[in-house]
Amino acid sequence: MNIQAAFTYIINTIAPIYEPREAANIAHIVVEHITGLNKLDRIVYKDRNLDPGQQNRLEEAVAALLQHQPVQYVTGTAWFYGMELLVNRNVLIPRPETEELVEWIVNDVQMGKYSNMQMGTKDLQLLDIGTGSGCIPLALKQALPAAGVWGIDVSDGALTLAKANAAKQQLDVHFTQVNVLDEAATAALPMFNIIVSNPPYIKQSERLGMQQQVLDYEPSLALFVPDEDALLFYRRIVQLAGSKLSKGGALYFEINEALGSEVVSLMEKEGFANVQLRQDIFGKDRMVKGENLRDV
């Protein structure tokens, strides 16, 4: 089978479970992963035959796709903020909306929005809570290389992968295991100028409307919260920020689009100032930021 035939084979085989455009995008990703050739090179070498090893990998990839496994888990990689990161079933697949959250933080820092958060200041300390693959702190460290950047998570598997991504990207991020719901554990954390989190925020009752790829493969620990306490992690992180976020610092969240007003109210009630709710590129309420103007 040559490269062009492999591309067509993937599309035709997965067509029953994917829309045509998505099937084509998946085929491009898989063929590039198997051959190492980008889209332009694959046009030039479209008649080149796959070797036996590549043929086996193609069949394994298609079998996984037919089981609704996300293509990022099939290839073991996902792109985020210009970085190719390792991913597996211990972590969520990085989303474009989260890139927007990172960009908001980077822009605020680079614009000198806060007197104690100037670009290049080595005193700048940032914390990502529930770091998963490490995509947020690695992107922040790449954009703000002089800053001290931390990532915490409760999952051993996630932290192992995050550390591997830091090594792959040659970025110095301090990853450590901390359960944010454990007040004793978080008490040992230092002070930070910026705290960011994309915590679990999907209600259990919302499972019915979700894609099978997500439900079957992405870690439930990083996705779901009880219906009766949808703000569980937001409330705890806001509380933590009250003691670990320096005066003049900021707390950033990615949110469930249905909980925007509730998260804003929670932050305002806990004393955060200038709380902003921002939409993503799809017009959905997706991010919230609040400033800590109190003495800690």
Image: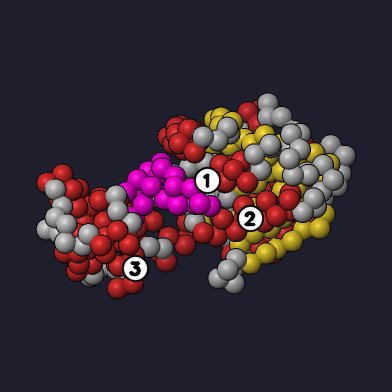
User: Would residue 15 be visible to someone looking at this image?
Assistant: yes
Point out the image quarter for the C terminus: top right
What kind of residue is marked 1?
Cys
Q: Which mark is residue 22?
A: 3
> What residue is pinned by disc 2?
103
SS of the residue under disc 1: helix
**Pick the front one: 200 or 11:** 11
C-alpha span from label 1 to label 2:
12 Å
**Marks 2 and 3 in Cβ contact (< 8 Å):** no
* Other-residue count near label 1 (Cα within 10 Å), few / some / many at <14 / 14–19 / ≥20: many
> Start and end of the magenta stretch?
70-90
- Where is residue 204? Give x, y as percent: 47, 56
What kind of residue is marked 3?
Glu
C-alpha span from label 2 to label 3:
26 Å
> What residue is pinned by disc 1?
135
- Total numbered labels: 3
C-alpha span from label 1 to label 3:
24 Å
